[in-house]
Image (cartoon, grey):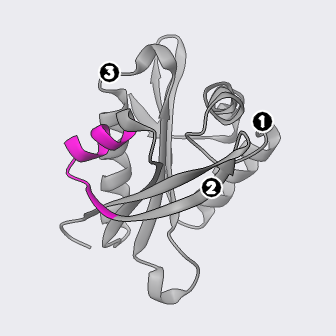
């Protein structure tokens, strides 16, 4: 099931996100996020009209996806960047695809024109996932991120939304 996140989901979101932050270069964010920080992020994104969704099953939260404005300024108001992560045991089960469908639906309803994913170039599974969902590579920024003592390239993948 896909639903809007609530601040009460923050601990479960942290349990999925923090190992990715701590142990991988999938995100360049350098420090783990506390449940209180994530509760605030969930509330803030939703108050601004952006999506923050979770997927759940009988055991609890299995993944999350969120959007925010791609860049500051009114000219980018219809360009959204997304984040999507699923629990390790949920990869390849369709959870990520369902979350992305929810994010795209929310973005379309809000009048967005496009979705952009900023993906570490070495994250080949995410690049392939986005390609399967109709995203194309729109740009590559060499050495954009620093983590674990080295630079990492960033790939921008995008998809136009039909009714934005």
Q: Residue 151: x and y, percent?
A: 63, 51
Q: Which residue is mark 1?
A: 35
| Upstream in sequence: badge 2 or badge 1 | 1
Q: Assess disc 2: are there few (<14), some (14-19) or many (≥20) residues with their C-alpha within 10 Å of its C-alpha.
A: some
Q: Residue 64: x and y, percent?
A: 51, 37
| Upstream in sequence: badge 2 or badge 3 | 3
Compared to residue 144, the image places residue 75 above or below, namely: below
Considering the image in quadrants, where does the C terminus appear?
Answer: bottom left
Q: Read off the magenta span.
A: 126-138
Give yes or no for residue 114 being in the magenta stretch: no
Compared to residue 1, the image places residue 58 above or below, namely: above
Q: Nearer the viewer, residue 101 or 129?
A: 129
Report the Cα–Cα distance between label 2 and label 3: 27 Å
Report the Cα–Cα distance between label 2 and label 1: 25 Å
Q: Which residue is mark 3?
A: 92
Q: Assess disc 1: are there few (<14), some (14-19) or many (≥20) residues with their C-alpha within 10 Å of its C-alpha.
A: some
């Amino acid at each position: 099931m896909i639903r809007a996140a609530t601040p009460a989901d923050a601990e479960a979101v942290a349990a999925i996100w923090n190992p990715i932050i701590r142990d991988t270069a999938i995100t360049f964010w350098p420090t783990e996020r506390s449940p209180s920080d994530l509760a605030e992020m969930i509330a803030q994104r939703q108050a601004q009209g952006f999506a923050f969704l979770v997927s759940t099953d009988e055991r609890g939260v299995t993944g999350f996806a969120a959007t925010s404005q791609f860049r500051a300024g009114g000219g980018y108001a219809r360009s959204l960047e997304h984040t999507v992560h699923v629990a390790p045991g949920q990869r390849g089960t369709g959870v990520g695809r369902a979350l992305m469908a929810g994010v795209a639906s929310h973005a379309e309803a809000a009048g967005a024109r496009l979705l952009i994913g900023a993906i570490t170039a070495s994250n080949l599974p995410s690049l392939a996932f986005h390609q399967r969902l109709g995203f194309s590579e729109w740009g590559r920024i060499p050495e954009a991120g620093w983590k674990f003592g080295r630079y990492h390239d960033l790939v921008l993948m995008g998809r136009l939304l039909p009714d934005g």
